[in-house]
Amino acid sequence: MTTTTSAPTPITGTAASTSSSSSTTRVQIFTPGDHVPADVSLPHDAVALDTATGLRRVTRICTVVMDGRRERDESTSTEIKNWHQSSILETRRDPTAIDVGDCVYGRVHQLQNDRIMIHVLAKENNTTSRAHEDKVKCAESERTADQVQVLVNHDADEAAETANLPEVTLLGSTTSTRLATLRKTDMRAFKVDELEISSYFRVGDIIRAHVIGKSADMTLLSTMHSDDGVLAARSSSCAGREREVLAPGEDATLSGRGSGAGLFSAASTSVSALKPLSHEFMLDAASGVKERRKVACGRRKSANKILQKYSLTEVIKS
């Protein structure tokens, strides 16, 4: 196989020749960022489309075995050697890579008119993909803003939910390399036109979402499923203190982060954490004020334990 000069040149090497004098074998290694030639087939999760150039790019290390066979060119009556892919010898996956179908945890970084930017903090391992791209109908039904219903635990056995927590991989803390996009059309399944982003998400909220799209320069998230949405949030009365620690769970108040402090700091001023009340409301127990959010309704107990275990609500440093 011949690599074009315009594409990144993969590392190549020639292995021992086979028993036939007309056939040889070589190993070709593709590293993240390399262009994938049209005659090479790699696993779907090892390739991403570069939307800027239209080229396929490798996202993880892949080692391909190529067979070189002499074939007769009938037009010139000469023999030429053509390289053909015979097998994929080895693929190594980056454990921090994010793929379509992954369940991720993140912090709301920025609000825009039609989308929000999420700083992805962690992902669950071995997540089964859901058909979010098919607009799966949420467990939420249409309700008016005045209807406040007690959250229903979607798991029949709460003990089983928290006994076997999924393994979680913590991701890098550099904001520029871990930003994902949650579009307005992917936030919920009903009355999308009436949705006001600033009413359902606030900067600093901790959310759970699923990856529904991935390219070389963009990651798309969805919170359509009832299990996805805001897991932990602080009261709007704490505006301007988004970088302080936010605690998940049922506690009504928590301490902010003092200089050199850990997750909780008695020396810091208390800030009010919101408790989930319904699919679209959370309660400030200190003041009794309800605030609208797109609340994650299902698997909350296991999610809160994950947030606590991995300290996902601590300050994010750029």
Image (cartoon, rainbow, N blue to C red):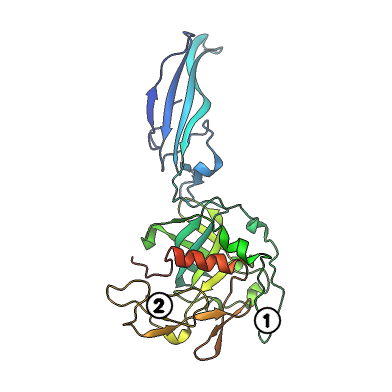
Percent coordinates x, y for residue 317 in the rendering: 33, 67
Depicted 181 relative to depicted 269: above or below:
above
Indicate the amino acid at tag 2: Glu
Circles 1 and 2 in contact, beta carbons < 8 Å: no
In percent of width and height, residue 190 lies at 68, 71
- Residue 3 seen in this snapshot: no
Few, some or many residues within 10 Å of mark 2 (<14, 14–19, 20+): some
> How busy is the neighbourhood of tag 1: few (under 14 within 10 Å), some, or many (20 plus)?
few
The reply to whether residue 8 is visible in this rendering is yes
Looking at the figure, which quarter contains the C terminus? bottom left
Residue designated by label 2: 242
Where residue 231 sits: x, y (%)?
A: 53, 71
As drawn, the label of residue 149 is 1
Nearest the eye: 62 or 78 = 62
Q: Which residue occupies 49% across, 73% down?
A: 248
Q: Nearer the viewer, mark 1 or mark 2?
A: 1
- Of mark 1 and mark 2, the one earlier in the sequence is 1
Measured in 3D between alpha carbons, the distance from the residue under mark 1 to the one under mark 2, in whole angstroms, is: 28 Å
- Location of residue 43 with respect to 203 vertically, above or below: above
Observer-nearest residue: 243 or 202?
243
Q: Residue at x 67, y 61 (%)?
A: 135
Report the label total: 2
